[in-house]
């Protein structure tokens, strides 16, 4: 390595030789002899300025030895030698260097740094920055709260309105087909929002061609339409139909809380199919979800309607999980325009190839309504608008907030549906049902934990432990800061 490690060459070594000088009559020690200093290194927070000083922390004698002749020992740049140098063996102490660096006046601090170093009790603790939320982060959290409330209101409203629609219009598949057809509005809504925000408005054809690259180099061809879009259109329709059919047989509270299990099914399928990282906490969450399903089934006494309704909701959650895992496996991740185009393609597929199914169900009197004037168009359109709003917010809300906050809106719809069911139906919230709802909700929240949650928890506990150790030391330093104890307090502060 030698002198090539420093761009400035010899002058840099001379400047650093003043802060660290090795005595020639002392031989290097082993790492086992400086274990207390190594333990102190774990608690040392080294910032960028100190790192630059440590990179140049080689004495003149080291540079002479490393840049000398072939007979000079070259082992002085080893890891052991550097740790000896950092821990103060050669007279260089990064703690004292950091204190001296903070005492030097800065050359024009930034506006954001001036209040932080001006006052406050945190400024005297070794220059440790205090935890505060920045403006963009607060704005993102505010948007997250608004998006979570929007998801909660649209999902709970759609569920309650569908339950009320079935009182006069007993056709769940027709309702699912009618609501899915509104997906054709995704790409027009996306383009309208893009035209309002972008300074240069792109043409519809140009934007459509750019988004078609998501399907491959050849774009959206007939083969791609039937191989990549049609299977997802079938899964989308099945998810909506099974959920709506289950609402006919069970209350909306049980249906909404059981649909939260799709998060656990997504994890299990991703672990098996996508080979995602194994996480024990998510396995526990999946077990809690399964236990909650069994307890909800037991809460109603294993009646035929409740068992069938619970099975339908679990099937709907499974179809939703399969849709998400296959999308990630076959298509990967999509941008906003590509996702809007894909959902619009699903709406087109629903109009072209699924429209015959409601007709067959009407002719066979499986789903029969008469007369046509008695169809509650207001409820059908209201449910479709709420479901479209739910999908728009859930798919495009990530642009303004965190995905975790958006997912919280789904679990927040459970207490909303419970309150509505309590006043509009004869639902009984016995102990088993309440425990099952709490267990499924807890499993859903555990699944929202990030993959590095254990690392963050260890860092938080370590930081709290260090802060507790610093507080008694600071209080002891304040008590001994009188005129008689000043000389005794300075060495303890330098350490």
Image (cartoon, helix red, strand yellow):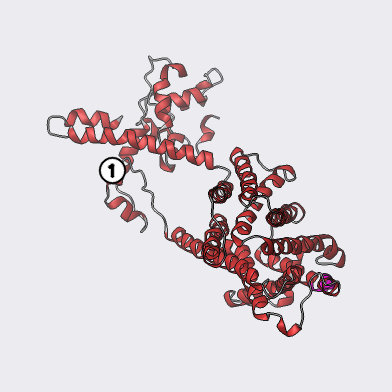
Q: Residues within 10 Å of mark 1 (few under 14, many from 20)?
A: few
Q: Relative to 106, is 138 on the left or the right?
A: right
- Image quarter where the C terminus lies is top left
- Image quarter where the N terminus lies is top right
Point out residue 61 in the picture as x, y percentages from the top left corner: 43, 24
Q: Residue at x 37, y 57 (%)?
A: 112
Point out residue 431 in the picture as x, y percentages from the top left corner: 53, 48
Q: Where 244 falls versus 56 (above or below)?
A: below
> Camera-side residue: 52 or 485?
485
> Camera-side residue: 138 or 32?
138
Q: Where 24 falls versus 385 (above or below)?
A: above
Q: Relative to 101, is 414 on the left or the right?
A: right
> Camera-side residue: 161 or 195?
161
Q: Where 113 falls versus 452 (above or below)?
A: below
Q: Residue at x 46, y 60 (%)?
A: 136
Q: Which residue is mark 1?
A: 124
Q: Which residues are magenta?
A: 351-357
Q: Relative to 334, is 401 on the left or the right?
A: left
């Amino acid at each position: 390595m030698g002198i090539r490690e420093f761009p400035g060459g010899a002058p840099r070594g001379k400047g650093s030789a003043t802060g660290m000088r090795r005595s020639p009559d002392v031989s290097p020690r082993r790492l086992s002899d400086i274990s207390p200093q190594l333990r102190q290194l774990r608690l040392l927070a080294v910032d960028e300025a100190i790192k630059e000083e440590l990179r140049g922390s080689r004495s003149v004698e080291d540079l002479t030895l490393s840049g000398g002749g072939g007979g000079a020992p070259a082992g002085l740049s080893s890891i052991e030698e550097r740790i000896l140098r950092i821990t103060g063996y050669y007279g260089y102490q990064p703690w004292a260097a950091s204190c001296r660096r903070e005492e030097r006046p800065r050359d024009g601090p930034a506006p954001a740094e001036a209040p932080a170093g001006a006052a406050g009790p945190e400024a005297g603790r070794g220059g440790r920055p205090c935890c505060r939320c920045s403006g963009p982060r607060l704005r993102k959290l505010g948007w997250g709260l608004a998006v979570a409330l929007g998801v909660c209101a649209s999902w709970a409203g759609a569920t309650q309105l569908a339950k009320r629609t079935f009182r006069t219009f007993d056709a769940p598949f027709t309702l699912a087909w009618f609501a899915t057809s509104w997906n054709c509005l995704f790409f027009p809504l996306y383009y309208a929002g893009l035209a309002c925000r972008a300074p240069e408005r792109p043409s519809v054809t140009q934007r459509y061609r750019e988004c078609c690259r998501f399907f491959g180099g050849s774009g959206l061809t007939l083969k791609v339409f039937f191989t990549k879009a049609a299977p997802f259109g079938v899964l989308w329709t099945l998810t909506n139909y099974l959920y709506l059919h289950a609402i006919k047989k069970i209350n909306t509270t049980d249906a909404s809380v059981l649909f939260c299990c799709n998060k656990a099914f997504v994890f299990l399928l991703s672990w098996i199919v996508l080979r995602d990282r194994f996480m024990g906490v998510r396995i526990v969450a999946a077990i809690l979800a399964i236990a909650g399903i069994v307890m909800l089934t037991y809460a109603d006494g294993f009646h035929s309607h409740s068992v069938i309704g619970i099975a339908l909701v679990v099937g709907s959650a499974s179809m939703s999980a399969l849709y998400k895992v296959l999308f990630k496996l076959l298509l990967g991740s999509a941008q906003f325009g590509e996702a809007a185009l894909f959902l619009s393609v699903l709406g087109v597929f629903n109009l072209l190839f699924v429209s015959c199914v409601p007709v067959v169900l009407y002719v066979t009197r499986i789903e029969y309504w008469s007369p046509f004037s008695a169809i509650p168009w207001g409820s059908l359109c209201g449910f479709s608008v709420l479901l479209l709003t739910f999908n728009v917010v859930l798919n495009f809300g990530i642009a303004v907030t965190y995905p975790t906050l958006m997912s919280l809106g789904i679990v927040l719809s459970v207490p909303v549906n419970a309150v509505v069911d309590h006043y509009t139906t004869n639902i009984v919230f016995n102990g088993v049902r309440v425990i099952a709802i709490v267990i499924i909700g807890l499993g859903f929240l555990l699944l929202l934990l990030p993959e590095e949650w254990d690392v963050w928890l260890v860092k938080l506990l370590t930081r709290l432990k260090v802060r507790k150790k610093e507080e008694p030391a600071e209080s002891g330093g304040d008590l001994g800061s009188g005129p008689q104890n000043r000389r005794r307090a300075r060495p303890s502060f330098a350490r």
